[in-house]
Image (cartoon, rainbow, N blue to C red):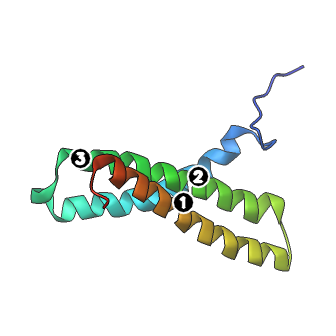
Amino acid sequence: MKNQLKSILGLDPKSLLLPALLGAIIPSALLIFLIIANRDSYELWMALPLVIIPIGGAFGGIFFYMMGFHWFPRGNQKLIALIFSCIIYFICLWLFSVLAFSITGHWD
């Protein structure tokens, strides 16, 4: 019998890797673009948000994938699930942004 690693959700981790990467690349690309556009203002504290915010995007991407393609795979429920999971994705990004900037002391 073959041993396979299963996640808590019953899926193999390889199927969750792509949504996590896609969810993390979106905020990473935006943050890196902002840093490249203004190279003179880069400081060391900006490295922590560059790590923490994409983690929130990865969690949001996994939630989006699970809602839209596994829990509600068809019909009107899928449309409602995709809209709801987009909102949750942006809430995850917001919460992890607040976390990153509060850790660095730049959130008042």
Q: In this view, does 73 lie to the left or right of 39?
A: right
Distance from disc 3 to disc 1, alpha carbons, whole Å, reads 21 Å
Judged from this view, the residue extending furthest toward the front is 108
Q: Residue flagged by tag 2: what amino acid is it?
A: Phe
- Among numbered discs 2 and 3, the one appearing first in the sequence: 3
Position of residue 8 relative to residue 62, above or below, is above
Q: Is mark 3 on a helix, strand or loop?
A: helix
Q: Which residue is drawn at 39% across and 56% down?
A: 28
Label total for image: 3
Give yes or no for contact between labels 2 and 3 (Cβ–Cβ under 8 Å): no
Task: Point out the image quarter for the C terminus.
Answer: bottom left
Report the residue marked by disc 3.
Answer: 45
Q: In which quarter of the image is residue 34?
A: bottom left
Q: Which mark is residue 84?
A: none
Distance from disc 2 to disc 3, alpha carbons, whole Å, reads 23 Å
Q: Where is residue 36 in the image (x, y as percent from the top left)?
A: 21, 59
Q: Residue flagged by tag 3: what amino acid is it?
A: Trp
- Among numbered discs 3 and 1, the one appearing first in the sequence: 3
Q: Residue at x 53, y 67 (%)?
A: 90
Q: Which of 106 and 52 is in front in this view?
A: 106
Badge 1: residue crowd in 10 Å (few <14, some 14–19, many ≥20): many
Q: Where is residue 39 in the image (x, y as percent from the top left)?
A: 14, 58
Position of residue 3 relative to residue 67, above or below, is above
Report the residue marked by disc 1.
Answer: 92
Position of residue 50 relative to residue 79, above or below, is above
Q: Which residue is drawn at 58% across and 52% down?
A: 59
- Among numbered discs 1 and 2, the one appearing first in the sequence: 2
Report the residue marked by disc 2.
Answer: 59
Q: Where is residue 82 in the image (x, y as percent from the top left)?
A: 70, 72
Q: In this view, does 15 lie to the left or right of 38?
A: right
Q: Residue flagged by tag 1: what amino acid is it?
A: Cys
